[in-house]
Amino acid sequence: MHETDMTKALILTVQNWWEAQPERPKISQVHLTVGQFTCVEPVSLQFAFEVQTRNTFLEAAKLVIQETPLVAFCHHCQQEYRPEIGVQYACPECRSPMEDIRSGRELKINRIEYCSDSAESYASNL
Amino acid sequence: MHQTFDAALEINLLHANQEGADHNRAHFDAWGITCLNIMSSPGAGKTVLLEKTLAALNQTLKIAVIEGDMTTELDADRLRQHNVPVIAINTGRSCHLDSKMVAGGLYQLEHQYNPSDFDLVLVENVGNLVCPAEFEVGEHAKVALLSITEGEDKPLKYPVMFQEADCLLITKMDLAPHLEIDVNRIIANVRQMNPNVTIIPVSAKIGEGLTAWFDWLQSQIPAAEKIASKLPDLTSA
Ligand SMILES: Nc1nc2c(ncn2[C@@H]2O[C@H](COP(=O)(O)OP(=O)(O)OP(=O)(O)O)[C@@H](O)[C@H]2O)c(=O)[nH]1
Ligand SMILES: [Mg+2]
Ligand SMILES: [Zn+2]
Ligand SMILES: [Zn+2]
Ligand SMILES: [Zn+2]
């Protein structure tokens, strides 16, 4: 499944950051934003992360996923609305098509939380 | 006692794939090639459509195919009968093509052929309605297929693919008399999220709509730029 690929990309990015830190800190949390209008399933991502980080420098790290809703902007009504995924995407007021997506497409690594004491010298054996 | 710290990253998860796709596109552009990414659920008719397309346009355009189907050699062999290069990519268990896999295909194209000779590269993606839409491979346009046997609600249920498509082919139109399906509702459902997409109902079997598809395809090839980009090749030969 593609969550495996996404997780690989995620771990690589975090690893690059980690290896650039002289003190190799212990990473406690990795924060992601995942939009609801993407093909990523947070539960599958959590699972893949758990499996793929076993016995690595990220073993103790928790993946924190913040989901963002699909929000569109209707230019005709000059207001935002929340399309009902799977049911209806056009503006509920005027039926204009969904053209301007304001949120919901995010797939982002926001930030890393780490402790001052360094990781117990894990080689990044990925 | 320990303190916790924060490091802001703000990096897209698909960043690496996106960079690879941009790289592939730069190669296509340098070679004067237009690349189309052809996507659908399994069995919607991608390979049959490619067969018809090769049969009709092979004389006018120089075409190569990158075949990303998991059952590759079957589909690839069907297409090779049209005497075009078909580069089969072993996608393994992956449910989509990514830019790295297609880069491998471009490497083959570059080393086994003269890529500047080509006008068009058609990429048949893995049959999957979900994630191929998220993984760009370096294409200039995305083509989605939806067969009328799949039902009117598919665009609503798998919206990302239909929202990203530049061209949607509604396939197997010859079956319409046998089904209770409202093609106008399929079209309306897609237009809800992608009002500007080109929609062409086709039947590869009986030929309906294929001329419109060939016209759209040819409209994607920038003629003038193409000639300009080929000039250095001709003079250096
Ligand atoms: N009736 C009818 N059948 C079609 C048409 N186009 C394709 N088919 C049939 O649909 C089936 C699948 O066609 P393919 O072209 O192999 O579909 P595909 O999208 O390449 O499938 P995968 O590569 O496995 O995802 C075959 O049995 C085709 O004969 C059509 O226009 N009309
Ligand atoms: Mg096929
Ligand atoms: Zn509106
Ligand atoms: Zn290159
Ligand atoms: Zn996938």
Image: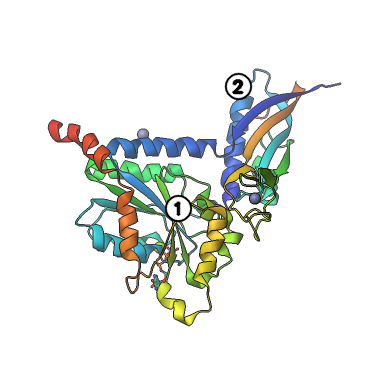
Give the quadrant of ligand 2: bottom left
Q: Quadrant of residue B39?
A: bottom left
- The residue positioned farthest toward the bottom in the image shown: B178
Name the residue at 61% across, 24% down: A19
> Can residue A96 be spotted in the picture?
yes
B108 or B182, nearer to the observer: B182
Both marks 1 and 2 on one chain: no
The mark found on residue A20 in the picture is: 2
Tell whether B86 sits left or right of B11. left
A51 or B116, nearer to the observer: B116
Tell whether B95 sits left or right of A113. left
Q: How is the image coloured?
A: rainbow
Q: Secondary structure at mark 2?
A: loop
Disc 2 residue type (three-letter): Ala
Name the residue at 44% across, 39% down: B21
Q: How far apart are the two marked residues, 1 and 2, measured between alpha carbons?
A: 32 Å
Disc 1 residue type (three-letter): Thr
- Quarter of the image containing the N terminus of chain B? top right
Residue A58: image x %, image y %? 69, 35
Residue A82: image x %, image y %? 70, 50
- The residue positioned farthest toward the top in the image shown: A22
Q: Kindly identify which residue carries mark 1.
A: B91
Q: Chain of mark 2?
A: A
Name the residue at 57% across, 47% down: A99
Q: Quadrant of residue A54?
A: top right
Name the residue at 53% across, 59% down: B190
Mark 1 closeness class: few <14, some 14–19, many ≥20 residues within 10 Å:
many
Q: Secondary structure at mark 1?
A: loop
Q: Chain of mark 1?
A: B
A34 or B198, nearer to the observer: B198
> Can residue B87 be spotted in the picture?
no
Residue B231: image x %, image y %? 18, 34
